[in-house]
Image (spheres, coloured by chain):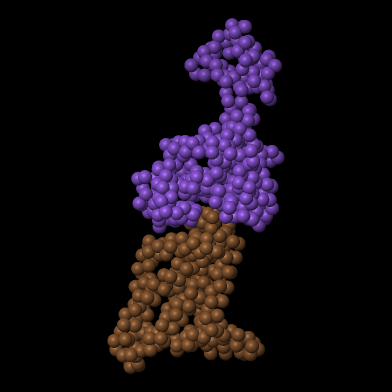
Chain colours: A purple, B brown
Amino acid sequence: MAALIEATALRKTFGAITAVDGISLSVRKGEVLGFLGPNGAGKSTTMKMITGFLEPDAGSARICGHDVLEEPKAAKAKLGYLPEGAPAYGDMTPATFLRFIAEIRGFEGNDIKSRVIAAISRAGLDSVVDQRIETLSKGYKRRVGIAQAILHDPPVLIMDEPTDGLDPNQKHHVRELIREMAPHKAIIVSTHILEEVEAVCTRAVVIAKGRIVADGTAEDLLRRAPTHGAVTLRVLQADAERIAKTLADLASVARVETTAEPDGRSLIRALPKADAAPAKAIGDLLRRESLSFEEIYVERGKLDDVFREITTSTQA
Amino acid sequence: MRDTLKTAYIIARREFAAYFATPLAAVFLTIFVAATGAFAFYIGGFFERGQANLFAFFAYHPWLYLLLVPAVAMRLWAEERKSGTIELLMTLPVSPTEAILGKFAAAWAFIGLALILTFPMWITVNILGNPDNGVILTSYIGSFLVAGAFLAIGSFISALTKNQVIAFILSATICFLFLTSGMELVQNVLRSWTPRIVSDAVASMSFLSHYEEITRGVIGLDSIVFFASLIVFALFANAIAVSQKKSA
């Protein structure tokens, strides 16, 4: 199946600063791409070029096959976009604002009303429809932006930090909404909240300094964490030294760390060698040697660690 | 073409309503009507002239526009850029031309409304005597055209900056230069160091000379072409400014 969003070698400089340096992306229907990167990495600039708001210095972007600069209207008709900060006309109410969007999107007659009502209920705006947008809380403003983006049920949805500034319940609501729509759309969501990637995205792209430094599922990213697959045991302090020594002899274990706890127990953490998963070997060993332990668990690694590692290393 | 007009109309309607969403509309309309009246009676000597016409009323319109039109125009684009809504607007299926036409039309209609609200002047002069209503009509048209030209310049300047105060001051200054380019004050300076053809060309750009002709009841083709081409040119520059400065 052809990709609904296709960006090819996008490049953008502002004066002496290269904000985006050759980013290519393609997103198919059913995919939710999490767009990650530290602040200033070029996430928003990339999205602005994909949506046709900014003209790239080089490269091109297509939405549903339409080049955003050569056929802007056709491309934009297929696109729902939530810009950074969810801008909206503050002097309007959500009802009049969404009505304006529906008219601009070419809906007529009863369609306008039904589209507006549907968007209001999906975004959970029912209680504030007649309040001026500038008087709304940050969370509601963000939801007005989301309602505006999904009003015409576009095949392509691009959202710049859709959950920024929302409380945990609102975040949950927005993620549910994204998950619901995901099977029928190609979606790009930028975020710097890593849990979001695991929660909603089928794929994650990490950029740093205007370049893509990682592209894969959340699981792929986690695999790059130094603690991914590490096994931690909680044992009596008296046994700690012996167990640690045994574990360190295993082929798949790189090294073993032991920490003494105040309650007379020790935590032993066996860190794996690259690409090794020592959990099974450790399990077998413990059983064979009849070593006793109180707790055992396998670590998945932290996305935060991976993120920090790949975005701060100079040459990734 | 039909789509263009329709989209421009939808934008114009939103913009027009936006004037009334804040006290701006009430303040502007009140001051415009009060000030045009005050100028006509106190400075223009409407009664002292003892003539059944509205010269005293129309003569001061361009000077009032100098202050009031940039105030209407300054928010058109500067506000969109400041609040970030320009990113929303320009990623909707809307072309820059449609957005510019819509915004300009809304602001022009707003000033048109202000002009219509000065109708008590027209009633007054018709009660007091038998004025030439044809001249009054052409004067209204002339006044509306001057406002449109100021507005197009203001809309262009507004697209160059995020700052509404800068937009206001710059447009008022440029409009002032256009207004006075035919006056002795400006012409004397120019004649002293430029060839005749330059000073004449500058003089022919004067809003005042074209406007005075119209308020005498003569709508010449040259005046219509002058104002129309000035509006088109300013809006064209506006389009370039909008697409160039979106990001900055």
The C terminus of chain A is located in which quarter?
A: top right
Q: Is residue A154 left or right of residue B39?
A: right
The N terminus of chain A is located in which quarter?
A: top right
Q: Is residue B228 left or right of residue A136?
A: right
Q: Residue at x 64, y 88 (%)?
A: B197
Q: Nearer the viewer, residue B9 or B45?
A: B9
Rendered position, B145 above or below A236? below
Residue B136, x across and y down, in percent: 40, 85
Q: Residue at x 34, y 79 (%)?
A: B119
Q: Residue at x 44, y 37 (%)?
A: A173
Q: Nearer the viewer, residue B173 or B107?
A: B107
Rendered position, B217 above or below A220? below
Quarter of the rendering containing residue B216:
bottom left
Quarter of the rendering containing residue A192:
top right
Residue A271, x across and y down, in percent: 63, 22
Residue B83 in view in this figure: yes
Residue B61, x across and y down, in percent: 42, 81
Q: Nearer the viewer, residue A270 or A284?
A: A284
**Circle count:** 0
Seen from this angle, which residue lies furthest left? B127
Q: Nearer the viewer, residue A225 or A132?
A: A132
Q: Is residue B124 left or right of residue A139?
A: left
Q: Residue at x 35, y 45 (%)?
A: A127
Quarter of the rendering containing residue A226:
top right
Residue A152, x across and y down, in percent: 49, 48
